[in-house]
Image: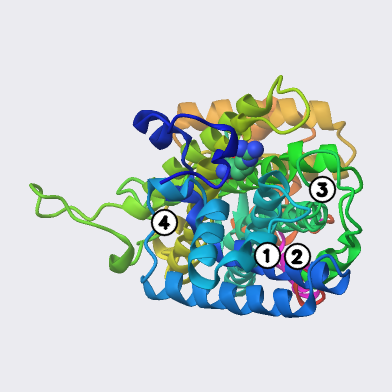
Amino acid sequence: MASLWGGRFEKEMDSLVKEFNASIFFDQRMYNEDIDGSIAHVTMLGEQGIVTKEEADQIIAGLEVIRGKIASGEIVFNVDDEDIHMGIEARLIAEIGDVAKKLHTARSRNDQCQVDGRMYLRKESKEIMERLLYLESVILEKAEKYADSITVGFTHVQHAQPITVGFVFMAYFQMFKRDIERLMDCYERMNVSPLGSCALAGTTLPTNRHRTAELLGFTAPTENAMDSVSDRDYALEFMSAASISMMHLSRWAEEFVWWNSQEFSYIAIDDSYCTGSSIMPQKKNPDMAELLRGKVGRVYGDLMQLLTVMKGTPLAYNKDFQEDKEGLFDTVDTWKASIQIFANMLEKTEFRMDQIEKQFDKGFLNATDIAEHLAVQGVPFREAHSIVGQMVKVCEVKGCDFEDLTNEDLQAIDSRVTKESLGDISIKACVDARMSFGGTAPAEVLRQVKVGKEWLENLPELA
Ligand code: ARG
C-alpha cells in the first residue's frame, strides 16, 4: 500500500524499514486522543472558513465512525498504517472519501503526536492522582489507628529510639504528599496545547490555536511552534516524578519484606497478597512487596532511556522522538499498578504488637532519653552522652538493662548520677515525651494526621 506521504517517492519502503519505522503497534493506545484532537482541529478549520462547515461536519461524523470501529475491533491496525495518525487518516479516507483529505490542513504529525501524548498523559495523571490520594487516605486511617502503638525506630538498621507505628505511617505520608505535589506541578506544564504548531514553523493559513486549545481543555496553546514539536520535557518530568514515587514505594516494600520475615514478625501480609513455593510446602512469600521493590528499576530505566534519546538532538522534530512512547507507557502502567497494589496490601496489613514488644529490651532504645533527663538536670549533653555510653558498657558486661544498674554502679561512673536521676525511662514514657514538633509522641502524630487530613480534603482537582 502506498503511503499517504508517498508523492515524491519512486520506490516502496523496504519491508524491514516499514517494520522499523512503524509506531502503530504501540501508539494506537492513543487513538481516542488522536480522534479528539482531529475533531477539535477540524472544528476550528470550519469556524475559520479554512474548510466549509459541511466538510467539517462530515469529517467529524466520519471520525466518530472510525472511533467506533477501532473500539469494536472492526479496525485492526497493521504495519501499513505506520502510526496512529496515518492509520486513522487512511481509514477515514476509506470511510468518507476525498473530503477526509482536508483534515490534515494546517497541522503536522509533529504537533499531532504531541497533542495526543499530552492528552493521554493528562488522562493517566488523573487516574494516578486518584490512586495516590487513595493510598494517602489508607495511610491516614492506619496512622490514626496505630498512633500510640509503639515500635522500634532504626538508624543503620540498628535499634535507635522507640517510635510509634503511626509515626512511621506519617513519614511515608509525607513522601507521597510530595509525589502528589510533583505530579500536580508537572500536570500544569503538561496542560498546554501544541496543536497547530505544524511541522516546526506554524502556518500561513488563518488558524486559531487558542480555539483548539480551548476545545481540548488545555489552559493555552504553547508559545513557540519549534519548541512545541521538539519538547518532551512533560514526559521527562512525569517520569522523574514517577521515579521518585516508585523509589518511595520500593523503600516501604523493602520494609514490608523485612517486617514480614520470621526474624521480625512485625506484620503478617495478607494471604491474598502472597504466593507459595512450588517445592517448599510451608512457604508464604511476600512476592507483591518484592515486585514493588523491584519495579522501580524499569521506571528509572524508562527515564534514562528518554533522557538519552533527547540528549544532543537538534531543533526541531527528529524521528528519534518517536522513541518517547514505549517507556512512557511502561512508566504509566507500572506506577499506576504499583500504587494500587501497595495501597490494597497496606489496607489489609495488621501489625503484630505482641511480637514487636518482644524487641523493646534489645539495643538500649531509651539511652538518649536518659541523656536528655541528665541534661535537664544541668549535666552538659556531651557529658551526659558519655555517662550513658559508660552505663551501656556496664550493662553489657553484667548482661542487664539500665533499670537493673545499682546506685553503686551509677556513682562509679559519675557522682551526679543516681537511679532517681535517670527519670522515667519506660518505653511508653520515652515515646509520650517526644512532643517536639514533628516528633513521635502519640499526640504529635495525631496532630500530623489532622494536618494531613486537612491537606487531603482541600486538594484542588487536576483541571
Ligand atoms: N510516529 C511519529 C512519532 O511518534 C509521528 C511524527 C512523525 N513525523 C514525521 N515527520 N515523520 O514521533
Report the magenta stretch's main SS.
helix
Which numbered dot is residue 266?
4
Q: Nearer the viewer, mark 4 or mark 1?
A: 1
Q: Measuring 53% from the left and 60% from the top, which residue is drawn there? A: 88
Please name the amino acid that badge 2 sits on.
His
Secondary structure, mark 2, is helix
Label 2 – label 3 distance at C-alpha:
12 Å
Q: Measuring 60% from the left and 75% from the top, which residue is drawn there? A: 141
Q: Nearer the viewer, mark 4 or mark 3?
A: 3
Secondary structure, mark 3, is loop
Please state which of residues 332 and 325 is positioned toward the viewer in this rendering: 325
Q: Nearer the viewer, mark 2 or mark 4?
A: 2
Q: Which residues are magenta?
A: 438-455
The first of marks 4 and 1 along the sequence is 1
Name the residue that disc number 3 marks: 197
The first of marks 2 and 4 along the sequence is 2
Disc 1 + disc 2, Cβ < 8 Å: yes
**Picture quadrant of ligand 1:** top right
Label 4 – label 1 distance at C-alpha:
55 Å
Name the residue that disc number 1 marks: 38
In this view, 309 is above or below 144: above
